[in-house]
Image: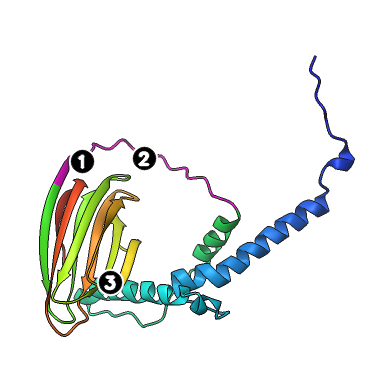
Amino acid sequence: MFNANIPPVSELPSSTQLLRSTAIAAAIAAVLLVTAVLPAEHGIDPTGLGRVLGLTQMGEIKVQLQEEAEADRRGAQGAAPDGKQSFDLEAIGTLLAGLVVSPAAAQTLPAQVAQATQSDTVKVTLKPGEGAEVKAVMTKDARLTYSWKSEGGTVNHDTHGEPTGNPNATHSYKKGRGVAGDDGVLTAAFDGHHGWFWRNRGDVPVTITLTASGAYSDLKRVK
């Protein structure tokens, strides 16, 4: 009925060849993990190549901003980070797997009522050493266009979000240290609160003006 050219067994890759290819892919992924992913994401640079490429400095900024944001969240309880970075082996395993294959996203969420598009402007003044956080409520995949500038000096910032019902599961979108402003489009990775954390590390007060427009609600300073 059908004419199909079935290759002979001799032309098919052997089990040894398949294992060799898998091992090579895993080795390449491991090298990328150690030389690029760990320095850029966690500031961990076992080979020293990440610092030469400028990736380690990027990771150190991310770690510092994460610790500052965590210290600010824990301030009410008087707890402070111990200065040591937690090292999640499961998360590293996920990163390694993602370098070999692209995991399929399979998540089904109940239907959500779309949020109306709106625009807001928020001003925040920070004393030297002071931090502040402004958040909006957004549903998954909602988009928010933003722009903020600081007057009087530069600030450290962390654009991030927390899922509804799990405020400790922070997801960072963008971070920076010693910058005078930023703009872009924030696409919510999940239902929850999304926005900005700023810290004034200068010697004089700074005023941050944030403008936002998009599908969100309840944009306000939360701390």
Residue in the foreground of this view, choosing between 73 and 160: 160
Q: Is residue 105 magenta?
A: yes
Residue in the foreground of this view, choosing between 141 and 182: 182
Q: Is residue 165 visible?
A: no
Looking at the image, the residue that sits furthest to the top is 1
Question: Percent from the top left, x then y, of residue 156?
Answer: 26, 73
Residue 44 relative to residue 60: left or right:
right
The amino acid type, in three-letter code, at marker 2 is Leu
Name the residue that disc number 2 marks: 109
The amino acid type, in three-letter code, at marker 1 is Gln
Q: Secondary structure at mark 1?
A: loop
For the record, the magenta segment spans: 101-118
Front: mark 2 or 1: 1
- Where is the N terminus found, in terms of image quarters? top right
CA gap between label 2 and label 1 equals 16 Å
**Nearer the N terminus, badge 1 or badge 3?**
3
Where on the picture, by quarter, is residue 158? Answer: bottom left
Label 2: how many residues lie within 10 Å, few (<14), some (14-19) or many (20+)? Answer: few
The amino acid type, in three-letter code, at marker 3 is Ala
Question: What label sits on residue 115 in the rendered view?
Answer: 1
Name the residue that disc number 3 marks: 69
Front: mark 3 or 2: 3
**Nearer the N terminus, badge 3 or badge 2?**
3
Where on the picture, by quarter, is residue 59? Answer: bottom left
